[in-house]
């Protein structure tokens, strides 16, 4: 294989893996938007909050330590134990469910039948609250998250793909990050599980029913509150997974919440209401931005990854506003 | 008029009407200062077709919403299966076995007809999420049984040809039928129909009447319906409640009601004082 | 072209006389041509009745699927062994109920295994099955049941039970009714009413008592026993009962199965009316002869979906069905994305060029073949699967002319669609197209064992082992249709093409009239040209004995409605759309194009349409304007809309009219409308100009 094709392939593979992560975040948006018509601006912060909580629990951090210390003049920070990763993940999940319940109980229950813009503003409020609350609870310093996921390049892949270079001395085999590989597998499993859940289980059917028509859902005996708490919990779970992946990759810090912004173009591409759309959209953006950077980037001075996704989304908005998989809205006479 | 006895009896056409399954006692419903329903009492007996009729704005729909839990009355009691019903949310009422349709049709437009009707069976699905996840034992059996029941309803209402069609693409008359199928799939103790014939042409009305009668006959479904088309109601129902301006002005068999002076006045528009 | 003669007599002969006539006199002496075929009777190996074929299949194909029906969303299956048991139980039940040999049993319902079993069970006990169109009006049913003196009826559901109860008083001989679907019937008086499954259960319970009787009755069936009686839906007058013997049915089934190499592996979808001879031959004659599987749709509305799921290998449809499907494909392509549409058009263009030749096995260049293969993968294959034709090996159409473009469309996709020409009186087959000799404008060569001659007036006559026994209780009609030598007049005019030896049909012999100037008036010829336009559903041409021609047109609501929707033209009804100026304008364009093509042939140039109108209602069988098989009843239309015809000839530019319509439930109403009368451009004909 010629050199450029080899590198191109590697770029595409890396792009696909980045894309899976984008898709994961976008999925959180889609779930909530479908079920309740709320565009959840706080999805990114939820990922941050989940990651912070996970690190806090694992490290045995005392929640609200700053507050306690300031109020009581003490100097406590840690319980002094370490919680195993798996248990910590389960505990974090429990907290995310609690959060979902609280969000429903204290915020959205009171906003039933409000305009979408009001609901959107409420999620902005929620985002800022959650960000501050997370800081207060776990502190604002950058943390390292290590749940035991493999890190660094995969030598196995490198060694076993070297032959593709066919004697090309500059080619050492494909370089793929092991964390990315794991993330891809996990995300893929998660996506399949979510699709199966929504298509084939009683709860999934109820969720789709609520997404479609509230009144009809009530009349067949579905509790809207229950479904909304469930949806927020599932979104919380997706946020946790996304938080773990990004956190393990680049540390748990405020910028993690900005991955939500990467999800926006994905949604515009894939449509706000489509689960497959979120996946395909994520992959297109992931591959597109890496490939663009690889091919055009050097000509325009690089750093195209910062804006490529948004420009692509903008072009899409012009030609296909409903996204690739979104429902076309036609006003019939 | 309001027969409170709980003895079963057999109608002229050979159907058995059982004891009272639901009783409304002195229901009053207000929106702010406006009284939508004033002190209304009536009962619904097992296996009968019970109609609530009245001119527009008589409070029929409000009454149906009280029964189905969408409105909570300020005064009065709802008795269901021999027990007083505490204030409930609509989904809890539905879980108790009271299914309904809506005048303006409330369906899951994005889902197929089959999926829509399947949601009517949610009440009958009890297996846990885990059992569903591994698709074994109870969950599998349950899904198969529910699907079989739903197919029976689909056959009954003659909507086989649109089984896989998204509901949003169907014409109005068929949507009404799908909504009925979904309500029927719940095997309700009481089926509430909110103006089942509204907006239909003569042929569709006849079809719908046939379905309502057959449903009652074949499944023994207790039906309470609201309608303002007097003619249709009189042919269908065993007993009729007549409302006007939120008050009950008549209650009895179609013949009783037809000869009731207050009812005649209400329909002919005699001035109220 | 399953047409019947129009002459008709109502003279009733007592049943017993009729019976003896048939058994002791007619069979030995009257059927000389059939005596000559005694050898082929031997060839069937003693399989001289449908029940005998059933017995053979139950042994030979015991575990092979014989019937399928979709019910509750699942395909239920019966093997030939199951089928034999089902039919035996029913036959025993019928004996138990009191059915005698020679009794007539009406069978009324949509295509379901139960009804096919009912017909064979009736034959097994020596009775005669009489399938009746299940959407017949009460009067029609009353006439048929009274005419054949049916004592029993096997019907589908409450709707039919009600219909027969309504007419029961006038049917003195009528005894018992059996229904299949019990819904809504529980409270009915069950003295003379029985549920199908109960009759079967009683039959099973009384097996010991009746089995010898059943075997004896079955044993008495011969090649000349009546197999079935089918009433023809005459275009005018009362229906006539065409009596077909086992010889007619089995010989026709055998010959036609061999003609197309039909085997036990075929799958067919039974969806055409059971009272129509075609369905009887396909779903009983050929199915029992070859042992193939008959699939019944879930309901009439699900037919297209069921067709896709079954994927029949042998398929028949009238041109109208192919037309509708093509229209739907075109509509979907209009709505499809640009890329998809361009790909479709591109490959369809290629298919048009080489598809037919590839199907006929003619030489085609390698590159064209390769491109066709790619097209098959991308377009033709998926399209065929969507239409349910993915596995069709032999497809037939008949009944009326099919548009050449429609015909070519299906053939170019690689579907072996052919034409045949047949009649009830011929037990279907008169001519058929052999593989590789298929054209849109002929109906093929004489079917095996069929002789054809053309009369002086151009009328087609045939003689074959399939020629019917008689019209029941109607010797006059029988005599005027079938002569002493066994030649049957078809009522159609046609000729054999030089060279190919294929038969071409011009029109009905009696419909080919003369214009005032003596030139030929061939309405069907012109109407068919009009109907080939997708937005024209039906056309009726008038002009016999007049100076020029005028026409009525029915637009196709699906096609025109879709066009209206795409162009944001709101409409509430057929009537509104039919009167829309843009619609009229486009129809006028079609009419003028047809005029140009009609003018090419000097013989027919007089048939050009001078004026036309678009009717305010769709012609409908319920209103008597069409037959149940959807053929226009010309005389009735001319009479009913006389005011409109007069207005067209009168030269006015608009006319108001009021028309009575019948709703599905039998109630009557009326619609009134003001119609625009349009002038169409005609091509001047040289000879005519000279004459003036």
Image: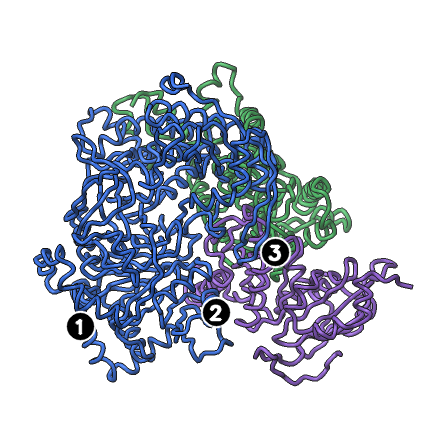
Chain colours: A green, B purple, C blue
| Mark 2 Cα-neighbour bin, 10 Å: few <14, some 14–19, many ≥20 | some
C625 to the left or right of C352 = right
Horizontal and vertical percent position of residue A284: 47, 31
Chain under disc 3? B
Secondary structure under tag 1 reads: helix
Q: Quadrant of the C terminus of chain B?
A: bottom right
Q: What is the residue that sits farthest to the top in this orientation? A: A299
Q: Which residue is mark 3?
A: B202
Instruction: Check disc 2 and report the residue beneath it.
Output: C183
Between disc 2 and disc 1, whose residue precedes?
2
Chain label for disc 2: C
The alpha-carbon separation of the residues under discs 3 and 2 comes to 23 Å
Horizontal side of C234 relative to A199 (left or right) equals left
Alpha carbon distance from label 1 to label 3? 53 Å
At 47% from the left and 27% from the top, the residue drawn is C610
Q: Quadrant of the N terminus of chain B?
A: bottom right
- Provide the secondary structure element on which disc 2 rests: loop
Question: Callout 3: few (<14), some (14-19), or many (20+) C-alpha neighbours within 10 Å?
Answer: few
């Amino acid at each position: 294989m010629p050199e450029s094709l080899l590198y191109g392939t590697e770029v595409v593979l890396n792009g696909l893996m980045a894309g899976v992560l984008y898709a994961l975040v976008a999925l959180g948006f889609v779930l909530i938007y479908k079920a309740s018509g709320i565009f959840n601006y706080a999805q990114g912060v939820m990922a941050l909050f989940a990651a912070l909580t996970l690190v806090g629990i694992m490290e045995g951090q005392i929640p609200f330590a700053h507050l306690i210390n300031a109020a009581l003049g003490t100097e406590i920070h840690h319980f002094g134990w370490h919680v195993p990763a798996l248990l910590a993940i389960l505990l974090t999940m429990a907290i995310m469910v609690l959060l979902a319940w609280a969000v429903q109980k204290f915020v959205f229950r009171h906003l039933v039948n409000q305009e979408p813009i009001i609901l959107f503003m409420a999620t902005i409020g929620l985002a800022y609250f959650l960000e501050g609350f997370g800081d207060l609870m776990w502190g604002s310093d950058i943390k390292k998250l290590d749940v035991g996921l493999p890190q660094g390049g995969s030598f196995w892949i490198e060694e076993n793909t070297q032959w593709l270079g066919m004697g090309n001395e500059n080619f050492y085999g494909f370089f793929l990050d092991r964390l990315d590989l794991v993330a891809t597998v996990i995300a893929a499993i998660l996506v399949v599980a979510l699709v199966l859940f929504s298509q084939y289980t009683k709860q999934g059917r109820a969720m789709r029913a609520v997404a479609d028509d509230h009144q009809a859902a009530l009349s067949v005996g579905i509790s809207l509150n229950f479904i909304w708490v469930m949806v927020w919990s599932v979104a919380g779970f997706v946020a946790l997974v996304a938080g773990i992946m990004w956190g393990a990759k680049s540390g748990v810090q405020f910028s993690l919440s900005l991955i939500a912004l990467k999800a926006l173009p994905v949604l515009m591409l894939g449509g706000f209401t489509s689960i497959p759309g979120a996946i395909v959209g994520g992959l297109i953006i992931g591959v597109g931005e890496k490939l663009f950077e690889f091919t055009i980037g050097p000509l325009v001075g690089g750093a195209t990854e910062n804006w490529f996704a948004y420009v692509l989304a903008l072009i899409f908005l012009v030609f296909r506003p409903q996204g690739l998989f979104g429902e076309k809205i036609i006003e019939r006479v | 008029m309001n027969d409170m006895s709980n003895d079963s009896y057999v109608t002229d056409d050979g159907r058995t009407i059982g004891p009272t399954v639901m009783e409304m006692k002195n229901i009053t419903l207000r929106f702010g200062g406006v009284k939508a329903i004033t002190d209304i009492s009536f009962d619904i007996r097992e296996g009968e077709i019970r109609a609530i009729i009245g001119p527009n704005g008589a409070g029929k729909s409000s009454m149906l919403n009280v029964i189905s839990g969408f409105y909570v009355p300020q005064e009065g009691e709802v008795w269901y299966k021999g027990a007083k019903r505490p204030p409930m949310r609509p989904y809890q009422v539905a879980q108790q076995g009271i299914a309904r349709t809506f005048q303006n049709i409330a369906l899951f437009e994005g889902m197929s007809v089959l999926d829509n009707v399947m949601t009517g069976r949610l009440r009958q699905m009890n297996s846990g999420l885990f059992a569903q996840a591994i698709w074994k034992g109870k969950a599998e059996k349950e899904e198969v049984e529910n699907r079989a029941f739903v197919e029976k309803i689909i056959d009954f209402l003659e909507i086989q040809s649109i089984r896989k069609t998204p509901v949003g693409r169907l014409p109005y008359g068929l949507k009404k039928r799908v909504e009925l199928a979904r309500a029927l799939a719940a095997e309700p103790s009481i089926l509430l129909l909110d103006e089942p014939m509204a907006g239909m042409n003569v042929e569709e009305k006849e079809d719908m009447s046939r379905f309502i009668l057959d449903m009652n006959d074949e499944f023994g479904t207790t039906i309470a319906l609201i309608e303002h088309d007097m003619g249709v109601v009189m042919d269908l129902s065993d007993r009729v409640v007549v409302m006007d301006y939120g008050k009950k002005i008549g209650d009895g068999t179609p013949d009783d009601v037809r000869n009731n002076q207050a009812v005649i006045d209400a329909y002919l528009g005699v001035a109220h004082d | 072209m399953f047409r019947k003669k129009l002459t008709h007599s109502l003279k009733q002969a007592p049943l017993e006389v009729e019976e003896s006539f048939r058994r002791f006199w007619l069979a030995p002496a009257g059927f000389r041509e059939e005596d000559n075929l005694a050898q082929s009777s031997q060839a069937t190996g003693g399989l001289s009745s449908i029940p005998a074929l059933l017995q053979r299949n139950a042994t030979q194909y015991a575990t092979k699927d014989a019937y399928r029906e979709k019910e509750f969303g699942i395909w239920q299956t019966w093997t030939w062994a199951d089928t034999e048991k089902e039919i035996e139980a029913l036959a025993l039940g019928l004996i138990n109920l009191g059915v005698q040999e020679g009794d007539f049993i009406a069978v009324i319902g949509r295509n379901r295994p139960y009804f096919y079993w009912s017909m064979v069970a009736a034959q097994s006990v020596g009775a005669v099955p009489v399938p009746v169109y299940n959407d017949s009006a009460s009067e029609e049913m009353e006439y048929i049941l009274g005419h054949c003196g049916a004592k029993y009826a096997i019907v589908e559901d409450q709707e039919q039970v009600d219909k027969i109860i309504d007419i029961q008083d006038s049917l003195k001989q009528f005894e018992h009714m059996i229904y299949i679907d019990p819904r809504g019937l529980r409270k009915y008086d069950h003295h003379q009413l029985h549920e199908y499954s109960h009759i079967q259960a009683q039959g099973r319970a009384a097996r010991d008592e009746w089995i010898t009787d059943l075997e004896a009755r079955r044993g008495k069936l011969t090649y000349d026993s009546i197999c079935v009686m089918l009433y023809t839906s005459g275009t005018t007058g009362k229906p006539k009962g065409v009596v077909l013997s086992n010889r007619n049915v089995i010989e026709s089934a055998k010959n036609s199965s061999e003609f197309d190499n039909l085997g036990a592996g075929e799958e067919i979808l039974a969806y055409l009316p059971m009272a129509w001879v075609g369905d009887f031959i396909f779903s009983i004659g050929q199915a029992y002869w070859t042992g193939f599987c008959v699939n019944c749709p879930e309901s009439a509305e699900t037919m297209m979906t069921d067709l896709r799921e079954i994927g029949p290998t042998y398929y028949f449809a009238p041109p109208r069905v192919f037309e509708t499907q093509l229209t739907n494909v075109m509509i979907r392509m209009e709505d499809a994305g640009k890329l998809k549409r361009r790909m479709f058009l591109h490959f369809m263009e290629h298919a048009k060029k080489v598809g037919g030749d590839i199907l006929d096995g003619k030489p085609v260049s390698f590159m064209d073949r390769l491109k066709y293969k790619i097209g098959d993968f991308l377009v033709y294959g998926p399209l065929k699967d969507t239409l349910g034709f993915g596995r069709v090996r032999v497809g037939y159409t008949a009944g009326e002319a099919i548009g050449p473009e429609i015909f070519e469309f299906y053939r170019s996709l690689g579907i072996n669609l052919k034409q045949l020409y047949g009649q009830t009186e011929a037990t279907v087959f008169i001519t058929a197209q052999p593989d590789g000799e298929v054209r849109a404008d002929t109906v093929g060569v004489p079917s095996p064992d069929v002789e054809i001659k053309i009369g002086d007036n151009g009328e087609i006559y045939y003689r074959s082992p399939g020629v019917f026994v008689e019209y029941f209780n109607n010797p006059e009609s029988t005599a005027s249709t079938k002569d002493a030598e066994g030649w049957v007049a078809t009522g159609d005019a046609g000729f054999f093409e030089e060279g190919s030896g294929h038969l071409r049909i011009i029109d009905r012999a009696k419909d080919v009239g003369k214009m005032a100037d003596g030139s030929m008036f061939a309405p069907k010829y012109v109407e068919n040209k009009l109907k080939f336009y997708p937005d024209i559903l039906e056309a009726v041409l008038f002009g016999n004995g007049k100076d020029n021609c005028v026409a009525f047109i029915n637009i196709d609501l699906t096609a025109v409605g879709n066009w209206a929707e795409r162009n944001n033209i709101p409409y509430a009804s057929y009537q509104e759309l039919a009167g829309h100026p843009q619609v009229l304008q486009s129809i006028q364009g079609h009419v003028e194009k047809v005029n140009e093509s009609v003018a090419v042939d000097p013989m027919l140039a007089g048939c050009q349409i001078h004026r036309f109108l678009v009717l305010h209602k769709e012609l409908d069988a319920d209103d008597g304007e069409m037959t149940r098989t959807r053929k226009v009843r010309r005389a009735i239309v001319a009479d009913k809309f006389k005011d409109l015809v007069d207005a067209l000839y009168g030269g006015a530019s608009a006319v108001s009219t009021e028309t009575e319509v019948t709703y599905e439930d039998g109630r009557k109403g009326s619609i009134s409308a003001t119609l625009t009368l349009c002038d169409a451009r005609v091509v001047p004909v040289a000879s005519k100009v000279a004459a003036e």
